[in-house]
Amino acid sequence: MSTTNPTVNVRLTNIPIIYENTEYLADNDLMVSPKTKKTVDITVSGQRSRIVNVTPQHVRVTADFQSLDEGIHTVNLKYSLPEGVVLEDFEKDMTVTIDKVINKEMQVEVYSIGELEEGIVIQSTSINPEKVSVKGSRSLIDQVDKLLVDLDLNSLTNSISVNRKIRAVDSKGQDLPGLTFGQEFVNLSVQVEMQKEVEIEPKIIGQVDNDYRLSDANLNRNTVFVQGPADVIKGLTKIQTHEINISSLTTSQTLPVKLDLLPNVRLVNPDFKYTIDLVLQEKADKRFDIPVSKLKIENPTSKEFEIEEKAINVVLKDFSDELEQIEEGQIELRIDISELNSGEHVIKPVVLIDGIVAEGNLLKEVSDIKIVIK
């Protein structure tokens, strides 16, 4: 029966050995011979989904040099592996030759190569350990100007924590071979973040009263520079504001706003104050005086009647841009007198605009008609 996630073996080569407790050797004017083994090869096993991405950089191999004196020694190797990964074929120990040397402890510095990709910024760098002892003949030690670890900026797009080999250089920056370090590798941690300009999207909630509408909402700045982990910032296209509730607004206002940032994302300029201009529009009235002569009267039995009014007043209520589109010629008034008996009656006409009955919020007022049926 096949399985989708079998256990497999992987061979990892050239895993650097981290020398521990080299301080003891330095204190006793001793050093590890340059011929001493510096890397190991191992075979590890694990489920394919776990082990497929395991590289030598995920494995930590250490050798403890505590209490060693001049001569040849056998030192146990200790392995630290990712969770779910098991050692199968590996070296349990190594042979170490200790020589008498001149010892000098020096700070390890980062030597940057190339340039960062646009938008990438280095938040911090750290080296562990910060200082390393360099060992060799006195004449060679006197030439050492700096101990360096290289950092390639061209390929640096995410934070890293990697083992880097130390190199010694003279005052002209030339490499000095033939030296031995208390440990040849140090851990270089670089915290990298990305800066990016993204759009700000106002998050407006609630509804204003029916007599008002929000006609515009303008931020004092429509974009913002944010900074954070590259894998988060790369996919970020916009930042929303915190909720802006307009339910109680009856006038245009300028309000302070805060930005709703994702975890680990922050503003490049946190001191800038963001505001939003909320432009509110109120409904207006528009009055029409419709001549009675334009009144359509449903009178199937041809009753005789008289109407005193010369014009009928119609008041519409809406926003100005909507009212501007309504002309008197679009308004039609109708009354039905077919069911009325003789005598005086007060009737409120039906108002139609473009053939549709005007009602609800649009029709604010229409004057009554006094009609006498004979």
Image (spheres, rainbow, N blue to C red):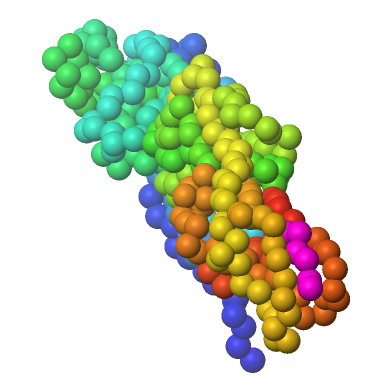
Q: Is residue 135 above or below residue 330?
A: above
Q: Nearer the viewer, residue 233 or 326?
A: 326
- Would residue 354 be seen by someone viewing this image from the given angle? yes
Residue 175 drawn at (x, y percent): 19, 24
Q: Is residue 62 one of those drawn in magenta?
A: no
Query: Mostly what secondary structure, the magenta segment?
Result: strand
Q: Which quarter shows the N terminus?
A: bottom right
Q: Is residue 338 above or below residue 312?
A: below
Q: Which residues are magenta?
A: 369-374
200 left or right, relative to 362: left
- Would residue 263 be seen by someone viewing this image from the given angle? no
Q: Which quarter shows the C terminus?
A: bottom right
295 left or right, relative to 359: left
What residue sits 53% from the left and 29% below the top?
A: 277
Q: Nearer the viewer, residue 188 or 346?
A: 346
Q: Nearer the viewer, residue 367 or 104?
A: 367
Image quadrant of residue 353?
Answer: bottom right
